[in-house]
Amino acid sequence: MDFIDLRSDTVTRPTPAMRQAMAQAEVGDDVYGEDPTVNRLQEIAADMLGKEAGLFVTSGTMGNLAAILAHCNRGDEAILGNKAHTFLFEAGGISALGGVHSCQLHNQPDGTLRVEDIEAAIRPDDPHDPITRLITLENTHNRCGGVALSVRYTRSVGDLARKHSLALHMDGARLFNAAVSQGVPARELVEPVDSVTICLSKGLCAPVGSVLCGSREFIHRAHRIRKQLGGGMRQAGILAAAGIVALETMVDRLAEDHARARRLAGCLAEIPGIVLSPNTPQTNMVFVGLSEDVALTADQVEHRLIEHGVKVGVVGSRQFRLVVHYWIDDLAVDRAASAFNLVLRQSM
């Protein structure tokens, strides 16, 4: 069966142009810094984000981990949100592998951390306390509904970080979704940050990889940590070639995903038993729940949708996350909505 897969934009497959670029990629040994395609990808990414240098890594999780370990020493503290991907879904790597203590603040519905909460969480110079070293943000914010942080907000956090001599890292796995949705260059969204990761393998459709960007000094430290994490790849230009195509051709078209997410939300809103989360969607994610008169759980609905050729993400006992991406066209949106309508009509 040819499934309509709305579980995540990580399920995207490389485009024909990417496959051709991968087959023809010029390669070398990247551990020696001699893979020209990797070097070009890193330069392109850094230039797009207004940073001095970039580092190709296997995943966003590796990029975030390498960044935090490059900013922090063992026993230092990083401030992040209680719904941050790094806190929820990265296997506790900053603590397990880096000995970095985390201070989790409450994420607001718009994905932000209140600036006054951040400032209140900064530790005093006291031998009883870990040393506050880093603030991390996420844009777009996954578990807050794919919401985009604004230039103004990020600048306010950047000002606070500089005031207290702290570093600021951005988990920008879907940064380009945030930029496209707000009509601003990505570099403006990350101008105040010291480091940022971008994922190539989500809405941009590349098969593997992320890029960590920052100053040359920072990337030099992160490069050593990447090696410690086992991330030294050899002829990685085969993968980097797809990433170059992603950055050069797939960013602007993210607006199509956002439009189809709005179309999907509109179709679902008309189905009895479906409740849209407030302000959804803002980018390519649609969060919906089941009303009280639906007897089925989200897991049960998920299994029945599979029988109709639709895969969805379950994020709660009665809630779904539906993610639109390159391989979801208008027909797929309509088919998914029809499947929801059929399954719920049969259960009520």
Image (cartoon, grey):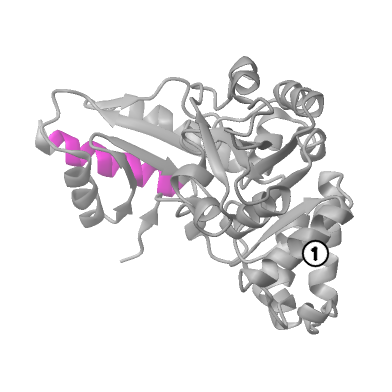
- Please tell me in which quadrant of the rendered image residue 264 appears: top left
Quadrant location, the C terminus: top left
In the picture, the quarter occupied by the N terminus is bottom left
Image coords of residue 271 (percent x, y): 27, 28
Q: Nearer the viewer, residue 205 or 126?
A: 126
Q: In terms of depth relative to the viewer, which is nearer, 8 or 75?
A: 75
The reply to whether the magenta stretch includes residue 303 is no
Q: Nearer the viewer, residue 92 or 56?
A: 92
Residues shaded magenta? 331-345
Q: Position of residue 146 (x, y in %)?
A: 52, 35
The structure residue drawn at horizontal position 60% and vertical position 46%, both measured from the top left corner, is 75
Q: What residue would you read off at disc 1?
A: 41
Image-quadrant location for residue 56:
bottom right
Q: Residue at x 84, y 69 (%)?
A: 39
Q: Main secondary structure of the magenta part?
A: helix
- Residue 81 in percent (x, y) is at 53, 32
Task: Give above or below for 289 relative to 329.
Answer: above
**Quarter of the image where one finds residue 319:** top left
Amino acid type, residue under disc 1 in the picture: Leu
In the rendered image, the residue lying farthest to the top is 116
Looking at the picture, does residue 323 appear above or below residue 266? below
- Residue depicted at 67% across the width and 50% down the height: 73
State left or right for residue 12 relative to residue 131. left
